[in-house]
Image (cartoon, helix red, strand yellow):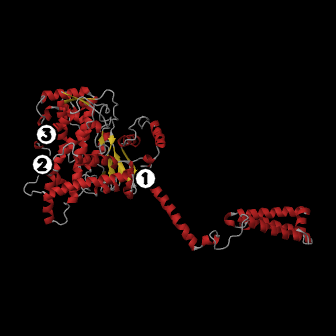
Amino acid sequence: MVSRCSVYRHNGLGKRRIAAANQNARSEAASPLGLPPSFLHSAPRDDLQRRRREEGEGSNLRRVEVINTREIGVSASMSSAVGAQAPVPEGSPGSPRLLLEPLGCALLLPPLLLLLLLALAWGLLLVRRRGVPPGPRPWPLVGNLGFMLLPAVFKRCIWSLLRLQRCAPRPRDPSRYSSQVVLEYLSRLYGPIFSFYLGPYLVVVLSDFHSVREALVQQGEVFSDRPRLPLISVFTKEKGIVFAHYGPIWRQQRKFSHSTLRHFGLGKLSLEPKIIEEFKYVKEEIQKHGGNPFSPFPIISNAVSNIICSLCFGQRFEYNNSDFKKMLHLMSRGLEISVSYQMMLINICSWFYYLPFGLFKEIRQIEKDLTVFLKGIIREHRETLDVENPQDFIDMYLLHMEEEMKSNSNTSFDEDYLFYIIGDLFIAGTDTTTNTLLWCLLYMSLNPEVQEKVQKEIEKVIGPDRAPSLTDKVHMPYTEATIMEVQRMSAVVPFGIPRMTSEKTTLQGYTIPKGTMIIANLWAIHRDPAIWENPKNFSPERFLDEEGQLIKREHFIPFGIGKRVCMGEQLAKMELFLMFVSLMQNFIFTFPKDAKKPIMPGKFGLTLSPHPFNVIVSKR
């Protein structure tokens, strides 16, 4: 018997054959799916047989060599294939046979399907529908909210790239992330009609007057619905007037609300005394500050809110009333939170609304507190209702509700709907007018030459003592032009209230699918250099002709246009004129010399309010 070692030492041919066998073993271990190389090619086996025939079979030593070579090759092949580990028993988790059994396939199927669905969803989101307006590419799930979720350092990098295209604001401009500013710059990149995704929802932005007019006026029936976004549904339950869906119920509720408010003086001279009476309280509060700087925010907010309170509740509140102050604060804070980027996440996953921390917890508490306040007032009206002598909007609604229920058990008139209408009236009648008056005071304090011209016109038409009246309006074009210029510059409702298409349509050559959310960018329209000369300059003269008479410009649409134009437009115009003229008639407003000028694009809530500022008031 010849030892294996002697073969290794004395036979060079054996060494070569052992090396060849080891090479074959390595090839088997490395071959695809673990198959032996003979399944892929037969050259090594044919070569071995040829050599054996040439050498003959007379030598026992060589037979042993070949046998030992095969044994070594098989051993090396097994060692390489299993990585020098113990063989894996059949049926163990790592057994190849198990992976081919039904149970193994079942374990692999769910994650593979999940990956496939995610890839499909991503692909559908990234591929824009044919004919839809251009826009930035969305992220999976979050759409174009992804940019706002980025850390600040990445936002700066992206903004720098936009700067290279001359589309973004100055790097140190503190307003660069304001919603209205961002959309204005996107319109420069993609054109006056562009789109983006709010989570999975397609949004189309209209940034020029012609597209807005075509959509909201010429195709008013198609563009008059409200978006069915989870965020809106959570807060409004799709009731009220402002956010209710376009249809028969909305028409009934709006018609009743408008006629009832007119009954109590909306748009009529009979409402004048209430506004002038409220200004007396404003005057007293302002005089308390003497010549010291103070914030006009609470005083103006209290006054405007009391006017809508007199229409809805039949009463006014003292400025130091704790419940009244709390309600105004909750409304202001709620509007600010509701349009934050954190709240936008509710449109991706509605259960975010119920998260027990941060802004989500705060907004739920605000909603709860406002509900308690408003429903308490409705309950008091129901308990003291005088059928023969209704005093305010709530009384009239309760009476109409009882009549409707007698004849129609499915009527939409109920206390729940009344609650949301009252909330809408406060939003439409308080926040917008308050912020416009605050912008008026800010622009007057920053432009004393304009303030002086307004006061001269007041002295000429009204005098120093008589209270202003709506009948004075036609004789005061410069004052009216000044109010209009403030509205143009401030764009208090920069995007109006979002619309939604009720069917598939075409706009300016683009395809707008059914259910698309529509934003009319009033901010961009009122600053469009193609319409307004030097649009960033404050100049009331742009609304006057050569003779100093007022010009009506069709591009000036602070209250929106179309079938869902602001219902409180007449009330707002009355309040703005009478309050602004009364303030200019009695006081001179000066901006503190050492104070820093506030950021002029404003602070975006549902409306655009000025950033906090102080003024110094001197009596005229």
SS under mark 3 = helix
Compute the Cα span from label 3 to label 1: 50 Å
Q: Is residue 349 above or below residue 542?
A: below
Q: Is residue 554 visible?
A: no
Q: Is residue 187 left or right of residue 282?
A: right
Kind of residue at disc 2? Phe
Q: Earlier in the sequence, mark 3 or mark 1?
A: 1
Quadrant (top left/top right/bottom left/bottom right) for the C terminus: top left
Q: Is residue 616 visible?
A: yes
Kind of residue at disc 1? Val
In this rendered view, identify the residue nearer to me: 264 or 380: 380
Kind of residue at disc 3? Glu
Residue contact at pointers 3 and 2, CB within 8 angstroms: no
Residue contact at pointers 3 and 1, CB within 8 angstroms: no
For label 2, the residue is 264
For label 1, the residue is 142
Mark number for residue 277?
3
Q: Position of residue 266 (x, y in %)?
A: 14, 46
Q: Earlier in the sequence, mark 1 or mark 2?
A: 1
